[in-house]
Image (cartoon, rainbow, N blue to C red):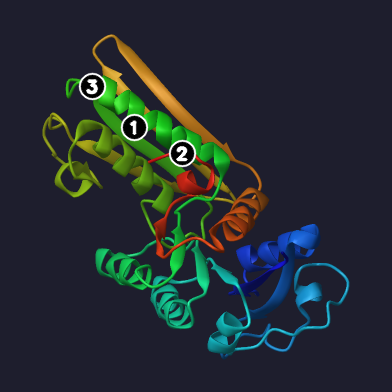
């Protein structure tokens, strides 16, 4: 069966990569359309051209509701506010939804969970296989070590990234917290400045760097007196996220309503 895939936010960097990945994906997927914001300069442009390819014959529109209804699954890497709205549209139309948007608040995540009660949704701060594997390892290592091991998470992204820490860094922190049987919100230290005093036992620290055109680098450090364990992932091409998202789109169509992660798509378990 050919899956109809729509791209929300088709004029952005990730949106254009998603268009190209779907168009180059062979017979398994068919691009059903793409939408952009009402004032976007990409409106009316051919989707093939936006993908850096030959004309496709469909233009970018602003009608997200129509795109959702004409697709089996929609993919988006957009803003938190827009994502919540589109999750509602997907739930109402009973269409699958793949979300790579980061910077979601707890209330916005709750809204997406409610939408997932009516339709299958894949929500992942990072769509790469490598990050999924690192996350699984972080949880396992954290479960194996006691609170005497300090956990620090360092991430770096390009200078234009709007949210910090990155969604991936927070997801890695959640994996570490799960391993310890605690809630990340109870132990996270998301910024240090001035006379902070000694490090608190059991906290999970975050540091965010921004600069240049760095696609994404994440490092989880487990530190104890006399030794240190480091797990790292370095992304050098955004195409890995588009490939992961399209893989998730193929997987999620036909699944029962629920909120899934990239580990479910890849069969890695929780």
Residue 81, placed above or below residue 41: above
**Residue 149's mark?**
3
Rendered position, 175 above or below 69: above
Position of the C terminus by quadrant: top left
Number of other residues with Cα within 10 Å of mark 2, as a class: few under 14, some 14 to 19, many 20 or more: many
Could you say which disc has been placed on residue 218 in the image? 2
Among the two numbered marks 3 and 1 on one chain, the one whose residue lies closer to the N terminus: 1
Q: Residue at x 41, y 65 (%)?
A: 257
Q: Nearer the viewer, residue 216 or 82?
A: 82
The Cα–Cα distance between marks 2 and 3, rounded to whole angstroms, is 19 Å
- State the separation of the CA atoms marked 3 and 1: 14 Å
Say if residue 148 shows up in the picture. Answer: yes
The earlier-in-sequence mark between 2 and 1 is 1
Name the quadrant of the N terminus. bottom right
Give the Cα separation between the discs numbered 2 and 1.
Answer: 15 Å
Mark 1 closeness class: few <14, some 14–19, many ≥20 residues within 10 Å: many
Question: Residue 25 vs residue 263: left or right?
Answer: right
Which residue is under mark 1? 139
Report whether residue 37 is seen.
no
Q: Position of residue 17 (x, y in %)?
A: 69, 62
Answer whether labels 3 and 1 touch (C-beta < 8 Å): no
**Are the residues tagged 2 and 1 within 8 Å (C-beta)?**
no
- Residue 234, position in %: x, y? 56, 37
Determine crowd level at label 3: few under 14, some 14-19, many 20+ residues with C-alpha closer than 10 A.
some
Query: In terms of image quadrants, where is residue 52?
Result: bottom right
Q: Secondary structure at mark 2?
A: strand
């Amino acid at each position: 069966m050919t899956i109809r895939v729509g791209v929300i936010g088709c004029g952005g960097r990730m949106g254009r990569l998603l268009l190209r990945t779907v168009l180059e994906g062979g017979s398994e997927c068919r691009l059903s359309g793409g939408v952009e914001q009402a004032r976007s300069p990409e409106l009316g442009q051919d989707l093939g051209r936006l993908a850096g390819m030959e004309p496709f014959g469909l233009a970018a529109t602003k009608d997200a509701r129509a795109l959702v209804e004409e697709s089996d699954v929609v993919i988006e890497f957009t803003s938190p506010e827009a994502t919540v709205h589109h999750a509602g549209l997907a739930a109402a139309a009973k269409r699958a939804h793949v979300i790579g948007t980061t910077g979601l608040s707890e209330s916005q995540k709750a809204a997406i969970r409610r939408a997932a009660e009516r339709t299958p949704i894949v929500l992942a701060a990072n769509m790469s296989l490598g990050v999924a594997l690192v996350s699984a390892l972080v949880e396992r290592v954290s479960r194996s070590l006691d609170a005497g091991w300090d956990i620090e998470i360092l991430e770096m992204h390009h200078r234009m990234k709007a949210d910090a820490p990155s969604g991936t860094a927070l997801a890695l922190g959640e994996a570490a917290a799960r391993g310890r049987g605690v809630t990340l919100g109870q132990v996270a230290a998301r910024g240090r400045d001035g006379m902070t005093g000694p490090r608190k036992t059991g906290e999970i620290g975050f540091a965010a760097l921004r600069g240049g055109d760095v696609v994404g680098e994440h490092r989880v450090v487990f530190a104890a007196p006399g030794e240190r364990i480091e797990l790292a992932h370095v992304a050098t091409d955004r195409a890995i996220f588009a490939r992961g998202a399209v893989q998730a789109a193929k997987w999620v169509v036909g699944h029962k309503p629920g909120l899934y992660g990239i580990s479910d798509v890849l069969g890695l378990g929780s």
